Image (cartoon, rainbow, N blue to C red):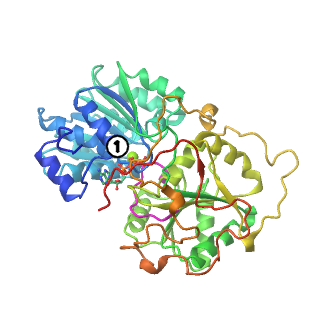
Amino acid sequence: MSFKELGLSEPILRSLEELKHKEPSEIQEQAIPIILAGKNLMAAAQTGTGKTGSFVLPILEMLQERAKPYGKNVHALVLTPTRELAAQVRESVNTYGKFTSITSTAVFGGAKIFPQKSKLKKGVDVLVATPGRLLDLVNQKAVKLDQVQILVLDEADHMLDMGFINDIKKIISMTPPVRQNLLFSATFSPEIKKLAQSLGDELVEISAQAPNTTVTKIKQVIYHVDKNKKGDLLAHMIEDEQWAQALVFSRTKHGCEKISNHLNAAGIQTGTIHGDKTQGARTKALREFKEGDVRILVATDVAARGIDISNLPFVVNFDMPTYPNDYIHRIGRTGRAGQEGTAISLMSVDEHKFLRGIEGLLKIKIDQTSHEAFKPTDKPSAGGGDSRSRNPRGRNPAFSRNNRSSDSKSGNSFSKPGGSSSRPSGAGRPGGSGAGRPGGSGAGRPSGSNAGRPSGNSAGNPGGNKKTGSKAKTRWKKT
Ligand SMILES: Nc1ncnc2c1ncn2[C@@H]1O[C@H](COP(=O)(O)OP(=O)(O)OP(=O)(O)O)[C@@H](O)[C@H]1O
Ligand SMILES: [Mg+2]
């Protein structure tokens, strides 16, 4: 089906043509008609499969036909968990809406509030916001929410989770009771689904792929390594395999800086993104990374959700994520829009419990290996090493376990049959194109060398994560 057949009009089709988005992704094909029909929707689809367009495109289409907002009013409100994602979604509204008269802005913390207030004065069609700053602006009477017609929760499961739910409830109470609710995420738990159903009447639920699954084109490997050797192993892999770029996740802000210093000392250029940095520094670091000017970005989970970095070849979990759903989002920064990618997780002996949770949620076995030069020697500490998962952030532990619903169907919007297992083991760079990235086309793994890759591993081919019931499907043409 074409975008035109989905009911989108000329100005929007023009921007899609300019972007070379030739056909809708699976989630776009499913979601756009439902949204245009005015229904409440909860949509799940894997990372990097075009969920942003799934809500932005029909919103633009609908608002084109409606009266313009006036006096601090907003017609569509999109809430995101992070500042960077708010800016990115607003950018998508701008890009997709380039040939329409739709107005939009983004508001988020860490940036000066006055310019945000002045942009809201005349009202905007689409406001993208983080909850905290939006509430500040409402309290300062800089924006009115009583004419909101469409409410979107991007990364919905996260927005309805402990950290955000109170702000979200407050914001919702300020919007009209009759409005269209749209919820999108790559992960949903049964608990969050229940909460979502309470937002409005007749929530239509769609799922482009089996819920809580990862894109088959992302090759996943776990490296067993001693905790104090992780930095050396990472530096070794980056240099030895000539990684063009990698996004490295650390559990803590302090950890980010430590990893960054370690890599810098090894002569590897890095940037960092975490909550202790100014917004200016965060924005700059992400921009430079997206533009390929910085080779390694070290981040906390602030960069895990929704951030779209095209052609990113590697994601590294320097620390195993505490929650399995975070694993899905983190590794989903690679392998986007049909591209291939590699996700490497460095696992020390005290982190095995997290792997169990991840494999339980994903219903796959992730290949495990160790590096010849960094064989682990640490033993589990008495009574503590491999214990059951903790719940430090007070989240519902159910979501850190296996929660897949039974009505799922498998598939991947972008991947060609064969998926990740078709990638030659040890290739230093997915896709092989290298366009526009430092390291260029020669950034692959030195040919004929086994350096830095599973050596003598017991886990077999690291390119073939064992997955059950997954059928790959080609949906997007590469452009
Ligand atoms: N129909 C399409 N054809 C080609 N590329 C597309 C299409 N729709 C979206 N894309 C591109 O795919 C990439 C991923 O899209 P998007 O960020 O919307 O993914 P997502 O599903 O929201 O992922 P996440 O779960 O990580 O938030 C973007 O670079 C986007 O421009
Ligand atoms: Mg998204």
The image shows residue 322 at horizontal and vertical percentages of: 64, 46
Camera-side residue of 27 and 189: 27
Number of marks in the rendered image = 1
Q: In which quarter of the image is residue 145?
A: top left
- What span is in magenta? 303-314
Which amino acid type is shown beneath numbered disc 1? Glu
Instruction: Give the residue displayed 43% in from the left and 39% down from the top.
Output: 185
Q: Under 8 Å from ligand 1: the CB of mark 1?
A: no
> Residue 267: x percent and y percent?
57, 80
Q: Mark 1 points at which residue?
A: 26
Q: Residue at left 43%, top 77%?
A: 438
Residue 39, given in percent of the width and then of the height, sits at 28, 25
Q: Residues within 10 Å of mark 1 (few under 14, many from 20)?
A: many
* 72 relative position to 214: left or right: left
Residue 307 visible at all: yes
**Left or right of 337 in this view: 425:** right
19 and 289: which is toward the camera: 19
- Residue 311 on the magenta span: yes
Residue extending farthest to the right is 382
Tell me: 294 left or right of 189. left
Residue 97 on image: x %, y %: 19, 48
Q: Is residue 275 visible?
A: no
Determine which quarter of the picture holds residue 370.
bottom right
Q: Does 447 appear above or below 74?
A: below
Q: In this view, does 343 lie to the left or right of 459?
A: left
